[in-house]
Amino acid sequence: MLIELINVSHVYQDENNVKALKNINLEINKGEFIGIVGHTGSGKSTLVQLFNGLIIPSSGTVKINGKNITNEKSNLKETRRHVGLVFQYPEHQLFEETVYQDIAFGPKNLGLNKDEIQARVNEVMELVGLDYDEFKARSPFNLSGGQQRKVAIAGVLALKPDVLVLDEPSAGLDPQGRKQLAELLQYLYQELEMTIILISHRMEEIAELSSRVIVMHQGEIVIDDNPVEVFSKEQKLHKLSLDLPQITEILHRLDERGLKVNTSLFSVSEASAEIIKALRSK
Ligand SMILES: Nc1ncnc2c1ncn2[C@@H]1O[C@H](COP(=O)(O)OP(=O)(O)OP(=O)(O)O)[C@@H](O)[C@H]1O
């Protein structure tokens, strides 16, 4: 078991004392691609910050790779090597003079030598789609928002984490940027067999990429299932102020009007093939 939460609750200790998480029990295994959805304020960001010890919960136990990170002897530095966290708008955390230095920051702290650092920076820049020679000496502050996001993600990947957690990574990206990000996540998951945990408000992104979907509501996990099951619960999702992926919604409407189609499809290409097939067999 990679990540295990046992009876975890969290209250932010301030004047409001918000109970952000309520009695969460959760197991995440190696090789899963987990999509986390829920309306704003439902506890998604708080939940994922438990996964690398950024937040220590008010009560309950968090285990990473079998190690209890909620006890005093835990080694959080080691945990953070295993679980890389890409925050919302990660480009706000870029701070070095060049793209190279920014991405090299983590590997340097791991104590790698110069050649190893260079090899890693080169490798992760290629992975995220930034040409090494073109971008290595550029200031991260003079790049486009999408390029900055790539630098920030490369910086986390340079630590070679087993688990990559991303909190709304496509927010503010244009359609091309979102497509590139989805392809990167698919590659990391399928080819490099990384475990991925993705928070997103974009249901099509979650449905197309995830092997398992967790739905949060008011600090609790209210649905935890595969995407086909989750997105078959249209009424329940609407009650939680969540939508179906738009293409799935169209299939549902066509089905209601008598065109017999498989309503558990999430991509435009699959759905259009299904609709053409259904029309031809009418
Ligand atoms: N640093 C903080 N201090 C106090 N309360 C907080 C803090 N961070 C979050 N909260 C509160 O905890 C609850 C859960 O917030 P969280 O950020 O985990 O939700 P979320 O589902 O990620 O929301 P969003 O989709 O808007 O990012 C909210 O009521 C929020 O106001």
Image (tube, rainbow, N blue to C red):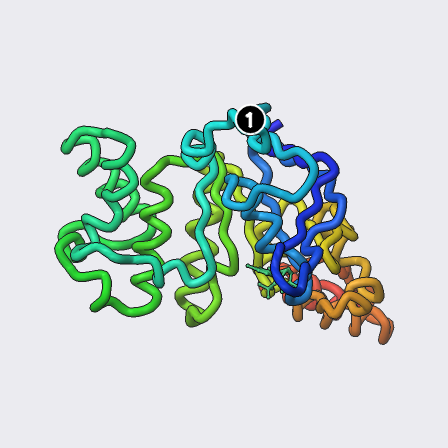
**Image coords of residue 28 (percent x, y):** 63, 36
Residue, far front: 15
Count every numbered label the image shows and give the total.
Answer: 1
Name which residue lies at 44% across and 71% down.
172
According to the image, label 1 marks what residue? 65
Cβ(mark 1) to ligand 1 < 8 Å? no
SS for tag 1? loop
Q: Quadrant of the C terminus?
A: bottom right
Left or right: where 180 falls relative to 270 = left
Question: With 160 as the anchor, is 4 left or right in this view?
Answer: right
**Residue 190 visible at all:** no
Sort mark 1 into few (<14), some (14-19) or many (20+) by Cα contacts within 10 Å.
Answer: some
Q: Amino acid at mark 1?
A: Asn
277, above or below 257, in the image? above
Q: Is residue 104 something one can see in this rendering?
A: yes
Give the residue drawn at x 44%, y 37%.
80
Q: Which picture quadrant has residue 119? A: top left
Q: Position of residue 279 (x, y in %)?
A: 75, 70
In the image, 41 versus 255, the foreground residue is: 41
Q: Quadrant of the N terminus?
A: top right
On the image, the x and y values in percent for residue 191 come to 45, 37
Please name the residue shown 59% across and 65% down the image.
202
- Residue 223: give x, y in percent of width and height: 77, 51
Quadrant hosting ligand 1: bottom right
Which residue occupies 51% across, 60% down? 168
Give 40 or 281, whichever is nearer the viewer.
40
